[in-house]
Each structure stands twice: as structure tokens, then as C-alpha cells.
Image: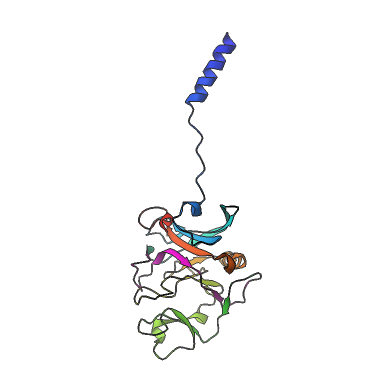
């Protein structure tokens, strides 16, 4: 009889015990869009005021997203801002989902790099002049209509631009005044002017991993709110 009573108590306890919590689906599986490829980079911050967060790169295998690696990330000195309404010169990192047109660097491409890789020279600039025809474009030699004070001399940042991926923010159809020169690159001394940065080793790993045939994109956003990364 005691055995039966004990068994009844155990069954009752098991019936009343809360069900084990299910592990959340991988971040890409919870996103509205991942760009249609089988590789994805996510850059997630706690909120729009954050200057740090996490970059994670993912592979889609067998219909599921699998984490390939991650690293601590830095964002703009003034946090993050909705990409569709961001303004140039605000030191904010634009949120959204973007393609990755090509890679570049002051250093040679890491072993295994499959991405188109442009080597920085002393004549390499990124034009950010709103009045220039080459707005938000790499140029070799500064065009006459792109003022040096409104352009970034890439070779002047050998540490940050040792390795970089161009983020396609405001790139295909540039809107003047929205912003230019947004990259995924190597950490500098602190927060960025609007880019996303990671340690040098992480950039080497990302460039060795990224395969343009698999159409990788980058999603930048926050954990919740209007700029939640899952919205993109």
C-alpha cells in the first residue's frame, strides 16, 4: 500500500511540474528576412543606445541555421539608428538588412578568402561628399568634385581597415545625406563612427568563411523595440 501511495504522489508531482522550457530558435530563424542566401551575419546590440554587442555568423545547413562563429562587436559612438531615416554625421550605426558587395584591406586577403578583395593603396579614398558623383563609393585618386575633407583616406587607417567588408547601406541607390562608408572592419580604440567592428582575428575568420556564391548578408539591429533585428 505504501508503495502505491508513493507512486501516486510521484505521478501527481510529475503531472504538476512545469514543462521544460524549449530552447529558442536560432536568431536567423526568428527574422523576417535573411536575404535569401545560405550565409548570414548578425550584429545585435541590447538597444539603440548601446555601443557594443555581438556579431555572429551563421550557415544554413539541411534547412536549419547553425552558428559558425561569434565575436564581441562595437557600434557607433552614438549607438544605432533606423537605417531608412539615419542622417550622415550622426555617428550612429544603421540598422537593417544589407548585402555585402566586396571586401577590402590594407593587409593581404586572409588565406581562404573567396570574396572579391580590393587592396588599399595610398590613392584609395571613400567619397562621402554629398555633392560628388562618386558619393558613397571607393575611388582611386580623389575626384575633383569630392573634397578631401568630405572623404576618408583608407590608407590612413591601417589598423581598422586591415580587413573589411563593405556593408551595402545606402549603396545601390545612394540618398544624399543618409550616410556613406559603412563597413564591417577591425576594432580601433573604441566605438566607431557608424560602422560595425570586431577583433582582427574575427575579421580574418569571417573573410575565410564568407562565400559570395552563398549570398551572405548582414543584419544589424537590437534585441527588441522598433529596431529589433528580427524585424529585418
Q: Position of residue 129 (x, y in %)?
A: 38, 82
Q: Where is residue 183 in the image (x, y as percent from the top left)?
A: 48, 71
Q: In this view, does 38 lie above or below 112?
A: above
Start-end of magenta stretch: 82-111
Report the front residue among 214 and 140: 214
Q: Where is residue 215 in the image (x, y as percent from the top left)?
A: 54, 66
Task: Tell me what residue is drawn at x 57 percent, y 67 percent.
Answer: 203
How is the protein colored in the picture?
rainbow
Q: Is residue 56 above or below residue 128?
A: above
Q: Would residue 100 be counted in the magenta stretch?
A: yes
Task: Point out the residue furthest to the top here.
Answer: 1
Secondary structure, magenta segment, majority class: loop
Task: Tell me what residue is drawn at x 35 percent, y 84 percent.
Answer: 131
Q: In this view, does 175 lie above or below 39?
A: below
Report the front residue among 62 and 23: 62
Task: Tell me what residue is drawn at x 59 percent, y 12 percent.
Answer: 3
Amino acid at each position: 500500500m505504501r508503495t502505491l501511495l508513493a507512486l501516486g504522489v510521484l505521478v501527481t508531482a510529475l503531472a504538476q511540474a512545469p514543462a521544460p522550457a524549449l530552447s529558442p530558435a536560432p536568431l536567423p530563424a526568428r527574422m523576417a528576412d535573411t536575404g535569401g542566401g545560405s550565409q548570414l551575419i548578425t550584429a545585435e546590440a541590447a538597444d539603440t543606445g548601446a555601443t557594443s554587442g555581438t556579431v555572429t555568423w551563421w550557415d544554413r545547413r539541411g534547412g536549419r541555421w547553425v552558428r559558425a562563429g561569434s565575436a564581441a562587436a562595437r557600434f557607433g559612438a552614438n549607438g544605432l539608428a533606423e537605417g531608412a531615416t539615419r542622417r550622415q554625421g550622426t555617428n550612429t550605426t544603421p540598422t537593417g538588412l544589407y548585402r555585402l558587395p566586396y571586401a577590402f584591406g590594407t593587409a593581404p586577403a586572409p588565406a581562404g578568402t573567396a570574396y572579391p578583395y580590393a587592396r588599399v593603396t595610398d590613392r584609395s579614398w571613400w567619397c562621402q561628399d554629398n555633392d560628388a558623383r562618386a558619393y558613397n563609393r571607393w575611388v582611386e585618386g580623389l575626384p575633383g568634385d569630392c573634397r578631401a575633407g568630405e572623404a576618408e583616406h583608407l590608407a590612413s587607417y591601417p589598423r581598422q581597415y586591415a580587413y573589411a567588408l563593405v556593408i551595402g547601406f545606402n549603396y545601390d541607390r545612394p540618398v544624399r545625406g543618409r550616410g556613406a562608408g559603412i563597413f564591417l572592419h577591425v576594432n580601433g580604440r573604441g566605438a566607431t563612427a557608424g560602422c560595425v567592428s570586431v577583433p582582427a582575428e574575427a575579421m580574418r575568420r569571417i573573410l575565410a568563411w564568407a562565400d559570395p556564391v552563398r549570398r551572405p548578408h548582414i543584419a544589424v539591429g537590437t534585441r527588441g523595440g522598433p529596431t529589433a533585428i528580427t524585424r529585418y
